[in-house]
Image: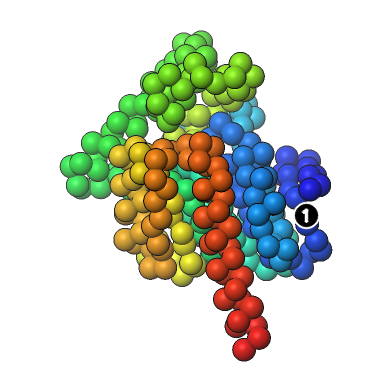
């Protein structure tokens, strides 16, 4: 597997030639392009895996804030990359990366062949009139503000611990390697921007999505992400919901092989159908 990186920080792993079917895999908040690179070993030869780096602390340095940043800004370089492909790409995403994938599919459907998403954190879906959903939305808003306050008060390490323990469970921060703690502490200033983009992303046009969509959730995940999965599968006409037994929100890391098999299966099903239609 050969990995290359351009000046925009986008890494990709070409397997064959430029006529291969592109698969763009988007990482979660706090991770990088290496999260999904193992998929290249599981894909059919017809596919080519593209693993971009999403924006990091440089977005804060550029002047963006929790109230101004949006998924539309995050998606700009990805859309430019997709437009250079020979055809529509399959989008794979986890958490924040899954929400970015949904944004692209909603606003540029011609660029997207299908979606395979592990717990996309479209928190704005919870900001509705159902009291239970509103309570879950408020919990995330308070979490985001707490992390933002800790950063403003000069405590990035504490902010990174709060973020990690929320998604990974109490004690998850202590279980991380020292280098991962350092990397998350370095990244954490971007975290409020991600939360702001997710809390206020428009939720229109989901019903118009025509692409085959696989939504994956963990059986032991947070109530927010489980509910978001239910709402998405109810609104996206071609969506199906798959559960990974025993997994939480960090399933792509803790249940890596199981999640990778589901992603590969989603893509193989498309490829088989594509070959049948081509031969017909």
Q: How is the image coloured?
A: rainbow
Tell me the residue that label 1 is attached to: 14
Tell me: 275 left or right of 129: right
Write down the quadrant of residue 23 in the picture: bottom right
Q: Is residue 83 visible?
A: no
Identify the residue at horizontal 49%, vertical 67% (top origin).
211
Q: Nearer the viewer, residue 155 or 255?
A: 255
Per the image, label 1 sits on a secondary structure element best described as: loop
Residue furthest bottom as drawn = 280
**Quadrant where the image shows the C terminus:** bottom right
At which x and y percent is residue 48?
A: 71, 58
Tell me: 220 left or right of 30: left
- Residue 166 drawn above or below residue 234: above
Q: Nearer the viewer, residue 37 or 212?
A: 37
Identify the residue at horizontal 28%, vertical 33% (top origin).
138
- Residue 263 drawn above or below residue 280: above
Identify the residue at horizontal 57%, vertical 50% (top origin).
260
- Residue 99 drawn above or below residue 165: below
Q: Nearer the viewer, residue 264 or 222?
A: 264
Q: Is residue 245 visible?
A: yes
Write down the quadrant of residue 112 in the picture: bottom right
Residue furthest left as drawn = 131
At which x and y percent is residue 126?
A: 30, 45
At which x and y percent is residue 237?
A: 38, 68
Label 1 neighbour load within 10 Å: few <14, some 14-19, many 20+:
some
Tell me: 232 left or right of 272: left
Identify the residue at horizontal 27%, vertical 37% (top origin).
136
């Amino acid at each position: 597997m050969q990995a290359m990186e351009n000046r925009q920080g986008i890494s990709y792993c070409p397997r064959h030639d430029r006529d291969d079917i592109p698969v763009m895999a988007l990482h979660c908040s706090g991770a990088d392009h290496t999260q999904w690179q193992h998929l290249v070993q599981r894909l059919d030869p017809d596919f080519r895996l593209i693993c971009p780096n999403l924006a990091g602390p440089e977005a804060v340095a550029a002047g963006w804030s929790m109230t101004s940043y949006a998924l539309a800004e995050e998606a700009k370089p990805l859309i430019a990359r997709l437009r250079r492909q020979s055809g529509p790409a399959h989008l794979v995403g986890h958490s924040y990366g899954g929400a970015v994938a949904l944004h692209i599919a909603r606003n540029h459907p011609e660029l997207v062949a299908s979606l395979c998403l592990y717990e996309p954190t479209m928190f704005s879906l919870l900001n509705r009139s159902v009291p239970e959903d509103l309570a879950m939305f408020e919990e995330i808003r308070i979490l985001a503000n707490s992390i933002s306050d800790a950063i403003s008060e000069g405590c990035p390490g504490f902010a990174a611990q709060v973020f990690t323990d929320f998604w990974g469970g109490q004690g998850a921060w202590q279980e991380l390697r020292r280098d991962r703690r350092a990397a998350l502490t370095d990244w954490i200033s971007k975290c409020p921007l991600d939360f702001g983009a997710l809390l206020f992303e428009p939720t229109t046009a989901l019903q118009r999505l025509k692409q085959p969509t696989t939504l994956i959730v963990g059986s032991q995940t947070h109530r927010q992400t489980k509910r978001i999965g239910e709402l998405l599968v109810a609104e996206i006409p071609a969506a199906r919901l798959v559960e990974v037994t025993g997994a939480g929100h960090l399933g792509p890391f803790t249940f890596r092989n199981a999640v990778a098999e589901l992603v590969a299966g989603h893509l193989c099903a498309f490829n088989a159908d594509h070959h049948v239609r081509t031969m017909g």
